[in-house]
Amino acid sequence: MVSHGIVAGQSEILNDHIAFRTMGVKNLGIASFEKIFLAHGYEKRDYFFFEGKKLDAHWYAPPDDELPRVFISELRVKDLSEKTQQIIAKYTGTLTADPVDSIDLNNVEEVTEFFHKPLWQLPTLEDYKALLEESEYAAWVIYNRYYLNHYTISVHQLDGEHRTLEQFNDFLKSIGITLNNSGGEIKVSPDGLLRQSSSVAEKVEAEFAGGEKAIISGSYVEFAERLPLPEFAHLPFAEIKRHMRRDGFESGNADKIFESTFTTQTSRT
């Protein structure tokens, strides 16, 4: 983006939201992980249920417009097969207390370190592949844990000719970025005001227990365009503030965005 003159530097990119994935088991899940953000003034908002993927989710509004929204999802582990539940319990069952309760939430370094902390032992490649067969979400979490799943560029805040997703997606494809095409490259909310695209997750070489290695899905980047609410649509671009644009999330959009790490998408790169 810098080399193409879209922005002068990273400071010009507004992060619409960041997303994390969790396991819905004792001592983990949304109830645990959300404590980090609630402690810093975030407010819990809408609940979402993704039946096909067996997920629950909530989004959290930031205390300051300069901060990103947060989207936390959780795998409904009890809805999975007994075999898959046993594999997940093999790793997460070693936690005897909520790990968030052991960190100082006011210590930025400690919280940052927590996102990268291995809360359970490294999985075997065999277990990873077994999870992958029933829930690609489960496989992603068992290896990546709380590592950032994705962050999101607010396309509507960009200057010049890249302010719409059509324009920005054309730029992305011109530099070789493969876009998630599940549900179309641009996922649109029923009201037409929230439009989202995402890259296909980067494939990374992962080392499993016992030293076995495999190429798996890492993280990805999302791109969001939030249009003005009808009562503000007439205003010039420079006068449109964050609260004047479509807020929140849309389950239909998010359902397809989840697939950015799925093999149906990563196999296209």
Image (cartoon, helix red, strand yellow):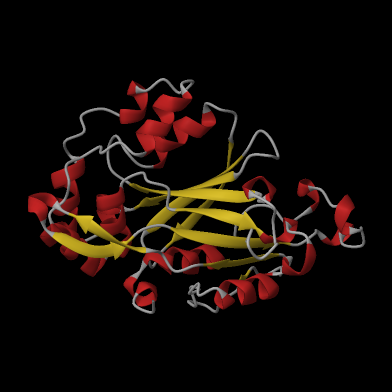
Judge whether residue 223 can be spotted in this image. yes
Location of residue 46 in the rendering, given as x and y in whole percent from the top left corner: 57, 48
Residue 205 position, x and y percent, is 25, 60
Considering depth in this image, is 107 or 85 the residue closer to the camera? 107
Q: In the image, is 78 to the left or to the right of 171?
A: left
* Left or right: where 253 falls relative to 165: left
Q: Is residue 101 left or right of residue 242?
A: left
Quarter of the image with the N terminus is bottom right
The residue lying at 64 percent from left, 68 percent from top is 189
Position of the C terminus by quadrant: bottom left
Question: What residue appears at the point 59 percent right and 62 percent down from the top-left corner?
Answer: 223
Q: Is residue 83 visible?
A: no
Q: Identify the residue at image location x=69%, y=49%.
A: 12
- In the displayed structure, would residue 118 be above or below residue 181? above
Question: What number of labels is visible?
Answer: 0
In terms of image quadrants, where is residue 118? Answer: top left
In the rendered view, tell whether residue 84 sits above or below residue 25. Answer: below
- Residue 268: image quadrant is bottom left
Q: Residue furthest front?
A: 3
Determine whether 47 is above or below 93 in the image. Answer: below
Q: Position of residue 7 (x, y in %)?
A: 69, 56
Q: Position of residue 133 (x, y in %)?
A: 22, 69
